[in-house]
Image: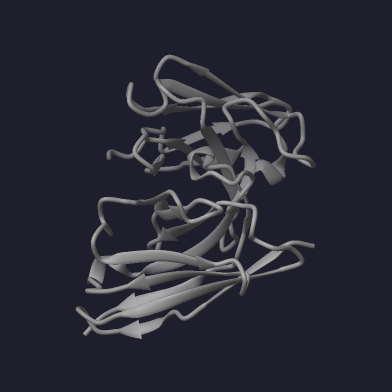
Amino acid sequence: EMQLVESGGGLVQPGRSLRLSCAPSGFTIEYFAMHWVRQAPGKGLEWVSGINYNSNFIGYADSVKGRFTISRDNAKNSLYLEMESLRVEDTALYYCAKDRSGYIEDYAMDVWGQGTTVTVSS
Amino acid sequence: QSALTQPASVSGSPGQSITISCTGASGDVGTYNFVSWYQQHPDKAPKLLIYDVTKRPSGISSRFSGSKSGNTASLTISGLQAEDEADYFCCSYGGYAIGVFGGGTKLTVL
């Protein structure tokens, strides 16, 4: 069974940084685009960032552009999200999701993790 | 980068059909056939129901179907069942490597 496990969440003060990781089990992410999607408490889904299978095409939501950096290490079979200059409004459950294709334009996220919680508060 | 527009709630009785709309703009839903739909039960991760406007992943019931007309995509659930009660989200490619979700629709099975 294909699964994704996120880690790295926690409580952090505004302005600080945090690095999220996503590790798959049961498959390799090498051929697939990957996404980060977040959900604030009681709110809807918000796409945060996506990366093509070969890291050649990357996208960010306007709300995080310039502060967050997505990356992947196919050799280590892992996905990352480096979050800097964190704001209170970044507080959310962060999901890692696998795309059906190698390209982020598809936005067909067929495997999701259970999420890792990021709380930004002083 | 505006969120796609979905009705906040819809409801239906068991056995009925319901349709959830997802309205975007010419730069997203209207331009690209990269619309997907997700089902989310409380405290659970989202689940892919439809991708590329009309395609169903393996294992998804044929009761779920997708369509698009102009800037509006739609998800239809036929033969409504109690377990269909959940939140539903649409998602579209918005160009320039950006994705956008709808605000979500809460489905109540009466």
Q: Looking at the figure, which quarter contains the N terminus of chain A?
A: bottom right
In this rendered view, identify the residue nearer to me: B9 or A104.
A104
Q: Quadrant of residue A89?
A: bottom left
Is B97 drawn above or below residue B15 in the view shown?
below
Colour setting: one colour
Q: Quadrant of residue A75?
A: bottom right
Task: Tell me how many marks there are.
Answer: 0
In this rendered view, identify the residue nearer to me: A91 or B51.
B51
Q: Residue at x 33, y 21 (%)?
A: B26
Is A73 drawn above or below residue B57 in the view shown?
below
Is B22 drawn above or below residue B42 in the view shown?
above
Q: Quadrant of residue B36?
A: top right
In this rendered view, identify the residue nearer to me: B52 or A69.
A69
Q: Residue furthest top?
A: B69
Q: Looking at the figure, which quarter contains the C terminus of chain A?
A: bottom left
Left or right of residue B83, residue A16 in this image: left
Which x, y percent locates residue B18? 59, 26
Which x, y percent locates residue B89? 50, 42
Which x, y percent locates residue B32? 45, 25
Is B38 drawn above or below residue B11 in the view shown?
below
Q: Residue at x 33, y 70 (%)?
A: A91
Q: Residue at x 22, y 74 (%)?
A: A85
Which x, y percent locates residue B69? 48, 14
